[in-house]
Image (cartoon, helix red, strand yellow):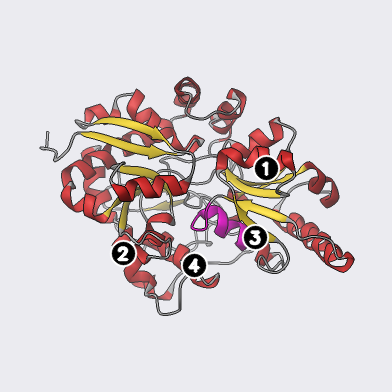
Amino acid sequence: MVDLEKTALRLGMVPLVDAAPLIVARDKGFFARQGLEVQLSVESSWASIRDKVVAGVLDGAQMLAPMPIAATLGIDAVGVPMVTAMSLNLNGNSIAVSEALYQEMGLSPCEPVAAGQALRTLLTRDRKLGRRKRVFAHVFPFSAHHYELRYWLAASGIDPDRDLRLEVVPPPLMVQALLDGRIDACCVGAPWGAAAESAGAGYRVISSFQIWNHSPEKVLAVTDEWAQRHPQTHRALVAALIASCRWLDQPEHRLEAAQLLIDSGAVDAPPATLRAALDASAIGAPHSGQLVFHAGAANFPWITHAVWFIEQMRRWRQVTEEVDALTVAANVYRPDIYREAAARVGVAVPDEDGKSEGHHASPWTLDTRSGPIIMGSDRFFDGQTFVNCAAAPLLTAGRDPG
């Protein structure tokens, strides 16, 4: 085994189902097999996670995919360069509305175009009647939730900065905020959308899968300084989590994984919602929206995913036009480290660092030197595609429609 610079680690996580790779890696021995002894720290908010990683209280953490980019750009009030060498999962978010708003929207069935049209009609009526702006919550300014919510609203003809008010609420507090009437809707990760339904606080009307099939969600992040001081430990950590994600994506393991989450006590939500979020019966269904932890190169840190997030930051005026998206993305997202770690656990890896988005409505095959990878669909609900011009040289296998 390779000598590690550090073997005892402390990692942060937020109470969400997509923290499962960390819990499983600890409880099923994947960390130990890489020579690591890991303690998990459950944090109440994403800001707490970020601050403790920056302060060195945590060696690394589960983070929202755009967080290390924002930290590196210095737009998060911290300004500490971070890196991620792996994604922890795809999908998992949902937009839930309060029971009152659900009744006003009159949705049946729920799908993004109809829901957007119903909400736009309602907000137009509210404005004419002089009613208060509706409050929609997301989990962090630099989160996939925030950008997915804005993407859906804008594509539906709703100005998220004019027609309603956006607010940040930590995931575990979303259900109570809906019950209290403090917010009218939220975009939040599993299991909190289902927990809102279970508590009678609201209904899920759209999943993040419906907005953008297999969109990136959480990543493993460390500071750039930590990664440089602990290169072998970093690769061992990524290798352990890849193995954990691979185990999680085997359908026969999902019930056991749900029980590990329940037994850990890390996610204080009804056990039924945790089991439902990891239900294996819907895996692979075209529009299941289920959490994906490993299949379809889910763990690969696609640089073009980072570019997409930076373009959303630019669209919503979080960064200026002068930011070089590709350079920033390539500094933060590190497929080179991923490939070295993946080799330790025998996982096929993409040959290219980027891929297009929006061209595939069904599974397709990515041929690589290490073997074919069955990729998931990547369709946006409004039919848009994304191939950043600056990132085009990164693309090969994902460029053509399947």
Mark toward the viewer: 3 or 1 = 1
Q: Which residue is mark 2?
A: 330
In percent of width and height, residue 293 lies at 43, 40
User: Which residue lies at the image location 28% right of the left edge and 45% below the top edge?
Assistant: 56
Front position in the image: 226 or 257? 226
- Quadrant of the frame with the N terminus: top left
Secondary-structure class at tag 3: helix
Question: Of 395 and 401, which appears nearest the observer?
Answer: 395
Q: Is residue 348 above or below residue 160?
A: above
The nearer-to-camera label among 2 and 4 is 4
* Residue placed under numbered mark 4 in the picture: 313
Image quadrant in which you'd find residue 26: top left
Q: Residue furthest right?
A: 129
Residue marked by disc 3: 152
Q: Earlier in the sequence, mark 1 or mark 2?
A: 1
Q: Earlier in the sequence, mark 3 or mark 1?
A: 3
Instruction: Tell me the distance, in whole angstroms, between the alpha carbons under discs 2 and 4.
Output: 16 Å
Answer above or below: position of 183 versus 359.
above
